[in-house]
Structures are given as structure tokens and as C-alpha cells.
Amino acid sequence: MKLLSRIALALSATCLSFAAAAQAFPNQPLRWVVPYPAGGGTDVAARTIANEMQQAIGQPIPVDNRPGANTIVGADFIAKARADGYTIGSADNATLALNQGLYAKLPYNPATDFSIVGGIARFPYVLVVGPKSSAKTLEEFLAAARKAPGTITYGSPGLGGPNHVAMELLQQRTSLKFNHVPYRGAAPGIQDLLAGTIDCMLVDTGSSMPHIKSGKLRALAVAYDNRLAPLPDVPTFAEAGVKDFSAFSWQFLVAPAGTPRAAMDKLGDALAKALARDDVRKRLGDLGIEPSPMPAAEATRFVAAEAERWGSVIRTAN
């Protein structure tokens, strides 16, 4: 056989093997990395959607919680994983927009180390107080804070996280100063709020809704452009007198940069199908989580705008 013929045959066989591999995806379980502890809104959304996606692709998608360092631990794990489609994960405000303004050096590059599969959801924030608080409205809460400046404590799921930075914005809008108590995730902060150890939290609805519905936490205002269907009687901050304050967590499903297009397409299709299901939308909606599918190109522009917006808040706070 002539040399050129042998080369052509070898290339043909290689292409066929690549095609077969792409068609075979996935042929083993995947892993969905969540950079927060179990029990929070990010974890709840991931488990809900992963359960539906695994039905579509025919392989299990267990959730792997890797919290720590304002999502850096989990994000770095995703970024450095093999780019074969079998490691995916949740990436939020902190991972893609905030950390670059908070840390002089990151172990990952938010702009180049991830391939965005698609949008997952938005998590509106709600300001909640515990059962020992006398404040029934946002106005009463802010009035009490003004009478005793510097004494109000608030919890957040982590130092430098979206909730923390959002509270910095609230302080800038109200000219008040609160004392920050960071936790490793929303759940332990909520437990301390229930116990009266801290005074308030600006927390995502996915984490707080069960406690609000049970009456254990009192919602004073939602940091969103409109009222939330599960909390129709809770005003927005704008309605309660605090203008230009809107804050929510957003989530994207990402894979390591360089993940094959065939795998990305299959994951994207499975994600879209999961988010289109009425039962999934209802389960998320009942927790105040808003399904928010978004294609990769639009997501890139959105992340850039969010990085600029919150970078300004961080610079002012510093």
C-alpha cells in the first residue's frame, strides 16, 4: 500500500473513532460539582435539575459538594477536571463575576477556564429576620438600625460571596453600617438566625423559603424588580422605600474549557429539557427559584456586565 493511502486510511479510522466516542457520550456516570454545602439553594436546584437531566441522557449525575473559599475550591476543581463532559458544575456570581474583584490572584481564570452549557436559574434575595425580632416591616427594621448604629448583625453564606456583596450595596444605599458574620453556606447561618445569634440575613429564597412558609423566619422585603409569586405579601425594597437596590444570585451550568462540542450539545439539550418541564419549574418556583435558561453567547455578555456592576460595589466598599 502506498504511503499516502496508508495515511488516508489511518486518518479515516481516527475520525471514525472520534465520531464513535462522541456518539457514545455519555457512557459512564457524570459528576455535578456544587461549590456550596448541601442544603442551600444552589444545592437544591442542582439536585432537582440533575435528577431530570440524568433521565434524558441515561446516566446518573450525582451531586458532589465541594464548598470553600467563596466557591474557589469547587470552581478550581471543575476548571482542572478532564474536559470530556463527565465533570460539570454550578457556577454563580462569585465564581464568574465577584472573585476576580475580591482576590489579587485566582487559581482559575473565570473568562477562559470554563465552557458555559447554559443558564440554570436566578435566586432572588429576601431580607429575613428571626422569631425574636420585633421588626414587622423593612421600615421598622431600618429605623431600629438607625437608632442603634453599628449594632445590627447579619449573616451570609460566605465572606465575599454574592450575599455579602449585596449587603454592602444595601449599606451604601441606606447609609447604614451592619456587622458581618460569615458562615460556610446558608444553612448554618439560618440556624443561627433562628436561634437569635444574629439579627438578619439577605438570603436566597431557595434556602429560606421553607422557614418563611413555616413562620419561623419573617420576610421583610425582596431584592427583586417585582414581588415573588410564593411571597405575594412581601414588598420589594423599592416598594418599601429603598430605591436602586436589586440583588439575586444567578447560576450557570459549566464544564471545563475544551469540552467536546458533542458533549456540550447533549448536556445543553438535557438541561433545556429539564428546565422546560412543568414539574421542575413548579418545584423550583415553590422555593422562589426562577428557572432562567440562557444560551452561552448571551451568558458571556451577561457575566461581563455583572462583573462590572458588582466590581464597582466592591471598589466602593474597599
Image (cartoon, helix red, strand yellow):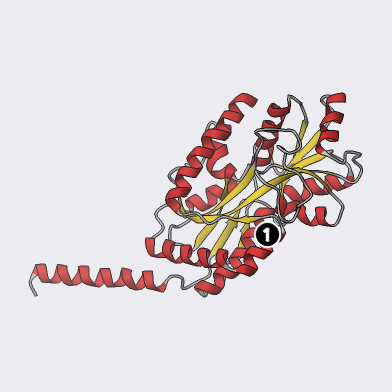
Q: Amino acid at mark 1?
A: Gly
Location of residue 92 in the rendering, given as x and y in whole percent from the top left corner = 58, 47
Location of residue 239 in the rendering, given as x and y in whole percent from the top left corner = 73, 39
Above or below residue 21? Residue 179 is: above
Q: Secondary structure at mark 1?
A: helix
Residue shown at 11% from the left, 71% from the top:
5
Q: Is residue 26 left or right of residue 92?
A: left
Q: Is residue 317 left or right of residue 13?
A: right
Quadrant for residue 264, please give it: bottom left
Position of the N terminus by quadrant: bottom left
Residue shown at 84% from the left, 45% from the top:
192
State how many labels appear.
Answer: 1
Above or below residue 57? Residue 65 is: above
Residue 124 visible at all? yes
Q: Is residue 129 or residue 255 the one in the foreground? A: 129
Q: Residues within 10 Å of mark 1 (few under 14, many from 20)?
A: some
Position of the C terminus by quadrant: top right
Q: Which residue is mark 1?
A: 285
Residue 108 visible at all? no
Q: Is residue 181 left or right of residue 306?
A: right
Q: Is residue 8 left or right of residue 21?
A: left
Q: Is residue 59 or residue 82 the one in the foreground? A: 59
Above or below residue 102? Residue 233 is: below
Location of residue 265 in the rendering, given as x and y in whole percent from the top left corner = 42, 63
Location of residue 314 in the rendering, given as x and y in whole percent from the top left corner = 60, 30
Residue furthest toward the left?
A: 2
